[in-house]
Amino acid sequence: MNNETMKGGIIIIVISFATVVSTIEIDNLPDWVHLAQPRQVHLALHEDADSMRVDWVTFSPVTNSTPMVRYGQQQNTMDNVELGSTHIHRFGDITRYYHSAVMKHLAPLTTYYYQVGSDLGWTETYSFRTFDYSDSYKLKICVFGDLGVRNGQAVPTLQKRVYENAFDLLIHVGDIAYDVFTDSGRRGDEYMEMIEPIATKVPYMTIAGNHEWNTATKSFARYGYMFHMLNYPENNIPLLGNQYYSFEAGPIHFIGLSTELYGFYYDMGFKQSIDQFLWLKKDLEAVDRNKTPWIVAYMHRPFYCSNINSYQCHAFENRLVRVGYFDMPGMEALLKKYKVDLIFAGHEHSYERSWPVFNYTVYMPNNDEPNPYRNAKAPVHVITGSAGCHTPHAAFKDPPVPSSAVRSLDYSYTLLQVLNRSTLQIDQVPIDPPSHSHLVDQFWMSKDGIRENMATISILSSKLLIFVFTVFAKSLLNSY
């Protein structure tokens, strides 16, 4: 379709939609919005390891057309096409059309080019690189929380690092845009435009924070429509959003959890948190620790913190997350029982790393165990809520609580790296550091007795046999 034809198609849709349907007040939309043009494109992982989900928004229906993604390994031959689905959501004075499609049968460690849209308009060509889902893959994950449109300090650095292929995956531990529903959702639109250059290159996995809960509508609806995580309610209106899910990548089983089902229990009741607890128990029971020796959870509200406003960690709603209340079960004991290794959180606008800790019992270095992160006896908690937003950092109180190992008020993000199946490296990276050698924090977690995966063992064994045979052959030749 040539440009003139495409422009005509869009004009027809705008006139038809504005005069017949009349559900969008065009004057209230930002200048950058062309109603049928795909916007706010972002990737997310899919239940199938060889697939990738892509989501986008239009501000009018794709009438007489179908939303779709076209993709391929060459920019000029994007021959693969998958049709998409659409959810419609009117919020305030704007109706948005949320489209989603899945790119399938993707090869590992391969660059793919893609466009999304319909006959009424296509995006520019984006690209992403798949990672290897084998349990020996040296995965690199960027984790951050509490990122706003105003003072979003981390965005330029994250964009630069994404284009340097520094991350395989992004995890946002809640509090997005401040707030996604502000001004009929325009704040969320602005945020998604801001994050698009990052989230079109790397899958962007999110979990809801307290700022995703709309007290006026008593729902996560805006967030739920924006982000299409795993465990998404395909056949239901996503008023509660994508509150919890799990996936595996490299030697890690990841679990995204909702602290907000506890935080707003007085609006939602107990059922939602009970459902999550039962799901979590079943999920943890099914983890194969031979395949994924590490379990990493992430959520919004932390269990432990040492900020001046640390009442936020000990407030009644937050205490519920840890220990529960009557029929509402807390999550800390369950996470400890199934030996979850590492828990990321946000909420506090700072960075803080704990010693291994459970129910305020802290496992600190001692003569018997100088490195408590080796074969840790309890989960390690990392608060990474310092990506930047409109509010100042949450200052720390002195002295710190016993569980606190390292803390910082620098703007920063977390880089979680798999060095091998037995060792994780966790760096806290400042925004625009003066040199790459400067880090806010760095530590390692390790486990004894972790075998390399069988494919790796097989390759090493083959190389060893070849080496032995070569040495033996040379010795025979030298003997003659």
Image (spheres, rainbow, N blue to C red):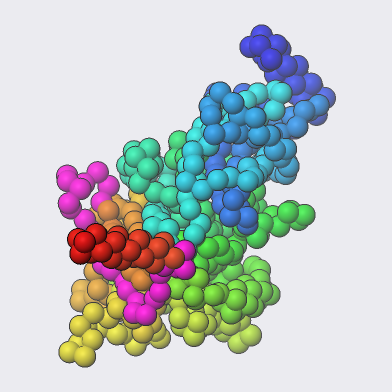
253, 386: nearer the viewer: 253
Q: Give the range drawn in magenta.
A: 430-457
Q: State the residue at coordinates (17%, 46%).
A: 435
**Is 454 covered by the magenta stretch?**
yes
Locate the C terminus by quadrant.
bottom left
Q: Can you tell which quarter of the image residue 12 is in?
A: top right
Q: In the rendering, at what x and y percent does residue 372 appear? A: 27, 81
Task: Report the side of 251 relative to 349 (left or right).
Answer: right
Q: Is residue 295 above or below residue 190?
A: below
Q: State the residue at coordinates (35%, 61%).
A: 466
Task: Report the side of 125 relative to 418 (left or right).
Answer: right
Q: Is residue 232 visible?
A: yes
Q: Is residue 333 above or below residue 259?
A: below
Q: In the rendering, at what x and y percent does residue 161 appear? A: 34, 42
Task: Report the side of 284 relative to 197 (left or right).
Answer: right
Q: In the rendering, at what x and y percent does residue 144 appear? A: 39, 55
Q: State the residue at coordinates (45%, 81%).
A: 339
Q: Is residue 11 visible?
A: no
100, 247: nearer the viewer: 247
Q: State the residue at coordinates (50%, 35%).
A: 127
361, 261: nearer the viewer: 361
Q: Can you tell which quarter of the image residue 302 is in?
A: bottom left
